[in-house]
Image: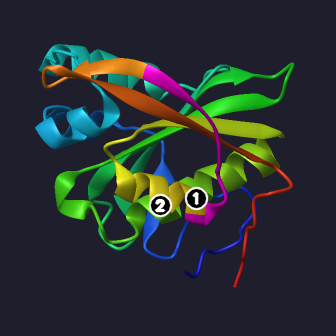
Amino acid sequence: MKEQCKGSQMEGSTINLRIARESDVQLYYSYLLEPEGNRLTGTHGDFTLDGTATWIKKISIPNEDRVDFMIVSKDTDEFMGEVVLNEMDSMNRSANIRIGIGKQHVGKGYGTEAIKLMLRYGFETLNLHRIELGVYTFNPRAIHVYEKIGFQRVGILRDTLYYDEEFHDLIMMSILENEFQWKCE
């Protein structure tokens, strides 16, 4: 992967991370309605186009406890998903990371690249020390990607999600700033 190291720009080899725009509303709304994405993230929400527009306006303004970026194609600026640092705690230099990729973009390396770019932003720009995430046990593809990047399993929260008529465990994982390997080619 050829990420470009240009200060704090969020530019990768195949994707860019950028702040949400009003023009993203319809695509983001469609993305929020994808059943498989909602299952993998444990989302039980009901979304409306108006609510989505309000949310896009909110996340397009920098906030002290979260940073939301849209994942877009580097070549076409096509919306592919989102990556978010939230629950930021400046005192303890920690945050949570979450990602969602539209179903037509899954399995192509975009998620790995987006996570790595966001980790670099979190550690280098925001001066975080620890970034954590939760992933459901029924998502082995994501677990593999997170471990490949350097996240370590730190525990299991049992039966945290009730989805499709059954309970599911959540694996908690984290990575520390000295464990993250950024390779700039």
- Give percent across and percent down for residue 117: 60, 58
Are the residues tagged 2 and 1 within 8 Å (C-beta)?
Answer: yes
Relative to 67, say whether 124 is above or below.
below
User: Does residue 114 show up?
Assistant: no
- Give percent across and percent down for residue 21: 36, 38
Relative to 53, say whether 179 is above or below.
below
Q: Nearer the viewer, residue 145 or 54?
A: 145
Relative to 118, say whether 164 is above or below.
above
Name the residue rendered at 31%, 43% in the picture.
Answer: 138
Relative to 68, say whether 151 is above or below.
below
For the image, the number of numbered tags is 2
Kindly identify which residue carries mark 2: 144
Name the residue rendered at 68%, 30% in the picture.
Answer: 95
Would you identify the image quadrant in which residue 70 lies? Answer: top left
Q: Which residues are magenta?
A: 148-158
User: What is the distance, in whole Å, between disc 2 and disc 1 at their CAs?
Assistant: 5 Å
Name the residue rendered at 48%, 63% in the picture.
Answer: 112
Q: Nearer the viewer, residue 11 or 123?
A: 123
What kind of residue is marked 1? Glu
Q: Quadrant of the N terminus?
A: bottom right
Q: Nearer the viewer, residue 48 or 25?
A: 48
Q: Is 151 included in the stretch rendered in magenta?
A: yes
What kind of residue is marked 2? His
Q: Which mark is residue 147?
A: 1
